[in-house]
Image (cartoon, coloured by chain):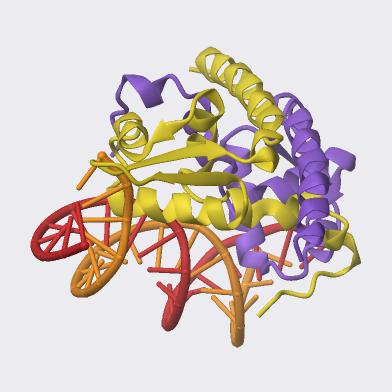
Chain colours: A purple, B yellow, C orange, D red
Amino acid sequence: MEVIYDDDIERCPVAKVQKVIRGKWSMVIIYFLSRETLQFSQLKRKMPQVTEANLTKELRMLEQYGLVHREIYREVPPRVEYSLTEIGQKFIPVLEALEHWALEYEHQEQLSQ
Amino acid sequence: MEVIYDDDIERCPVAKVQKVIRGKWSMVIIYFLSRETLQFSQLKRKMPQVTEANLTKELRMLEQYGLVHREIYREVPPRVEYSLTEIGQKFIPVLEALEHWALEYEHQEQLSQ
DNA sequence: CGGAATCCTTGGGGATACTG
DNA sequence: CAGTATCCCCAAGGATTCCG
């Protein structure tokens, strides 16, 4: 099922990691987890427009891709904390660059309206 | 049709610009255009797995969002060149950060296999 | 060359209800 | 609290054909 890239696009690193961050809420989740470790319900509260089912899915994907760590505390009531892995933390500069660009983009959009 | 974000996610700039770069090939297109102005057919050749119809769609979206400039030369045969706008060029640091991360990510994946 | 128009498929993501 | 389990839908994206 893997696409066979030709020489040109194969040299594009962006193409390779795209699937990792293309989930609708992936980057937002990483953004929030970059600031603090969060429990499921805390994360959910920050993203009310995401259903629990989908939030779970996205977290599982990010976990599979190795960006997010899931720590289970077997207490009563049970507690699960999500945090960034090492490679997940290394993604923060990307988010910062994106944030910076977002501000410039927003500013320009306001000018053109 | 616009989602009403609550206070938390509203402060997340990532969420705001996500739609701009979520096209499957958006970032790859920006990547290639960051290196050189390209004609439609040149871009197509670099991305053989994208159909012409979809490449057109993505380019139109990026044009709408203001990242890509489309210059038409009325010659025979007609020629159309795609390049990055100013705000499009300002996106390059994001790509560079992503590239850098992609290399670290790739390296880690190799270790874990 | 650089598309437009059409049709079709898929899976990402939404809504709802239930559970250890 | 932290999820599962379903069901469902639509729009993103692919394939194909035609055009100035």
Measuring 63% from the left and 30% from the top, which residue is drawn there?
Answer: B95
> Where B89 falls versus A73 (above or below)?
above
> Where B43 falls versus A31 (above or below)?
above
Q: Name the spot of residue C8 as percent of width and height, x first.
A: 20, 69
Which of the two residues, B100 or A82, is positioned nearer the viewer here? Answer: B100
> Where A25 falls versus B80 (above or below)?
below
Apparent side of residue A57 relative to residue A3 in the rendered image (left or right):
right
Measuring 70% from the left and 76% from the top, which residue is drawn there?
Answer: B2
Measuring 61% from the left and 46% from the top, which residue is drawn there?
Answer: B67
Query: Which corner quadrant of the image does residue A111 belong to?
Result: bottom right
Quadrant the N terminus of chain A occupies: top left
Measuring 51% from the left and 56% from the top, which residue is drawn there?
Answer: B61
Query: Which corner quadrant of the image does residue B104 belong to?
Result: top right
Q: Name the spot of residue A103 as percent of width and height, x first.
A: 83, 47
Apparent side of residue B55 relative to residue A51 in the rendered image (left or right):
left
Q: Name the spot of residue B17 as percent of width and height, x first.
A: 70, 53
Which of the two residues, A15 or B26, is positioned nearer the viewer here? Answer: B26
Apparent side of residue D12 relative to residue A43 in the rendered image (left or right):
left
Examine the rendering and report whether any part of residue A82 can be seen.
no
Quadrant the C terminus of chain A occupies: bottom right
Which of the two residues, B28 or A65, is positioned nearer the viewer here? Answer: B28
Examine the rendering and report whether any part of residue A42 can be seen.
yes
